[in-house]
Image: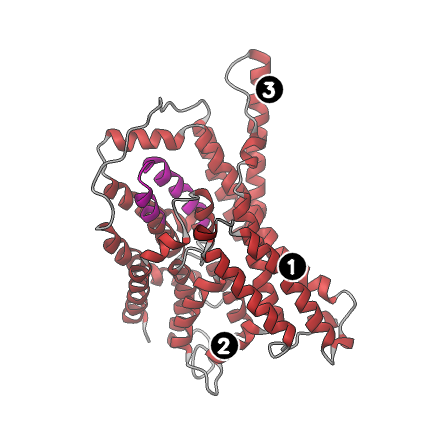
Amino acid sequence: MTANLLSFDLTSTGPAQIALVLFCVAYLLVVLEERLHVRKSIPVVLAAGACWTLVAIAYHAHPESHRLDASHMEDRVMHHVADYGALFLFLMVAMTYISAISQHNVFLKLNSILVSRGFSLRAVFWLTGALAFFISPVADNMTTALLMGAVAISVGRGHAWFISLACTNIVIAANAGGAFSPFGDITTLMVWQEGKVHTGKFLALFVPSLVNWLVPAACMHFLVPKSSPEGVQQDAQLKQGWLVVILLFLATIVTSIVFHMAFHIPPFLGMMTGLGYYFVYGCLVTRRHHKSGKGEPLDVFKNVADVEWDTMLFFFGVVMCVGAMQELGYLTLVGNWLFAADGGIGPFWANVGIGVLSAIVDNVPVMFAVLGMNPPMDPTGALHTPVADYNWLLVTLTAGVGGSLLSVGSAAGVALMGSARGNYTFGGHLKVMPFIALGYAASIWVHTLLNGA
C-alpha cells in the first residue's frame, strides 16, 4: 500500500499537546453554552481548523515525514470528512421529514389527542420514552429521538422542566433501544459489519438495554410535574397529505435499511433516496394546485431550510476534532492503556470505561478505535467463545448507552439539543446524570448476570 497509510505517535509533541488543550477548551465552552450564550457549534468549528493545522505541523516535523506522499494530509482530512458527510446527509433527511410532518400539524394533532384523553405529563413522559425504546431498533436512535422529542416539545409547551426531563428520557430510551439491534445505532452497525457479534446474538442485550432505560426513568418519574398538559390554542386539524408524508418517511427508513442489509450500501444513500420520494410528491402536489386550484402548493425546500444548522455544524466540529485526536495518536494511546495484554486493566473494566469515554468523545470514533485495535476479548485470543461473545456484547452495550450520560455523548442527544433549543440543554441533562449512571451500572450487572460466561 502507499505511504498514505502511515501513522505516527505524535502525542508527546508540542503541537499535539496544544491541540488536545484546544479540544478540551472547546468542549468546555460547549458545556457552558447556556451561561455564555454562545452557540455550541462556534467553539468546535474553530477548534477543528486549529487542531488540523497542528496535526499538519506535527506530521511535517516528524523525522519520518519524508516517507509520506504529498497528498497525505489531504487524504487524512477527506477520510474524516467522509465520516461527517454520511452523518450530515442522514441527519438532514431526518430533520427535513420531521419539519414536513410538523408542517402538516401531525404533532399538534397528537398534542390535542393526548390532552383530550386526559393524559398527565407523567403519562406522556412514559409514553414517549416507551415509543422511543421500541422504535429506535428499526428507525435508529437519532431519528427516533427527533421524532419523539417533537411530540414531547409540542405536548409540554409551557412546561420547560417537563420538556427537559422528557427529552432526557427519550435520549436514554432511544440509545438503549438502539443497542440491541444491528442497525439501531452506528456503533452496532460497525460491530455487526466486522462480524464481532452475529445478528441473532444482539437480542441478548434486550433485557440489559431495557434496564438501562427503566432505572433512570423510574427515578425521574417523581421529578415530572403531576399536572396535565395545556390544551392547544389553535384548531388542530391535520392538513391534506399528512398520511402520505408519514408513509414516505417510513418508506425512507425502510429504503435505508434495505440498502444496507441487502446491497451493503451506506444507510445515508437510502435516506437521500427517500428524500427524493418527498421531492417527487411535492412536485405532484404543486402541479395539481396550479392546474386545478385544489389544495396548497408544497414547498419542500422550506422543510430543508428548517434543518437545525447549529447542530449540523456542531457535528462537523466534533467529528473533525476527534479525527485530529485520532491522527495524533491519542485514541490509540487510550486504547492501549485499556486493552494492552501487559498492564492493561482487562476487557471488562476496559469496556466499562469505553462507555464512559463515549459520553465525552462520541461513541463512533471510540468504537472505530476499538475495532481497529481488535483487542483480545478472550484471554486465549479465540473468537466467538462464550467469554469473547460476552465482552463484545458488553462493549456494544456500553458504547451504545454510555453516550446517554451526557447530552453531547450521542447523536440523539446532540440532535435533540438543537430541536429543543433552550428547553433541553447540557445543564438540564447533567442534573439527572446520577440516575443515568445508576441505570448504566444496572445494565452492565444484568448483562453479566444473564450473558456472563
**Residue 290 inside the magenta-drawn segment:** no
10 Å crowding of disc 2: few (<14), some (14-19), many (20+) = some
Q: Which of the two residues, 157 or 29, is positioned nearer the viewer here?
A: 29
Q: Which residue is mark 1?
A: 49
Q: Residue at x 28, y 57 (%)?
A: 216
Residue that sits furthest to the top in the current view? 292
Query: Amino acid under label 2?
Result: Pro
The image shows residue 37 at horizontal and vertical percentages of 48, 48
Give, as a three-letter code, the residue at label 1: Gly
Q: Return the x and y of residue 174 as percentages of the image width and height.
A: 38, 51
* Mark 1 or 3: the one toward you: 1
For this orientation, the residue located farthest to the bottom is: 342
Distance of label 2 from label 3 (alpha carbons):
58 Å
The one nearer the camera, 152 or 285, is 152
User: In the rendered view, does 87 fall on the left or right side of 237?
Assistant: right
The answer to which of 429 and 363 lies nearer the viewer is 429
In the rendering, which numbered label is found on residue 375? Answer: 2
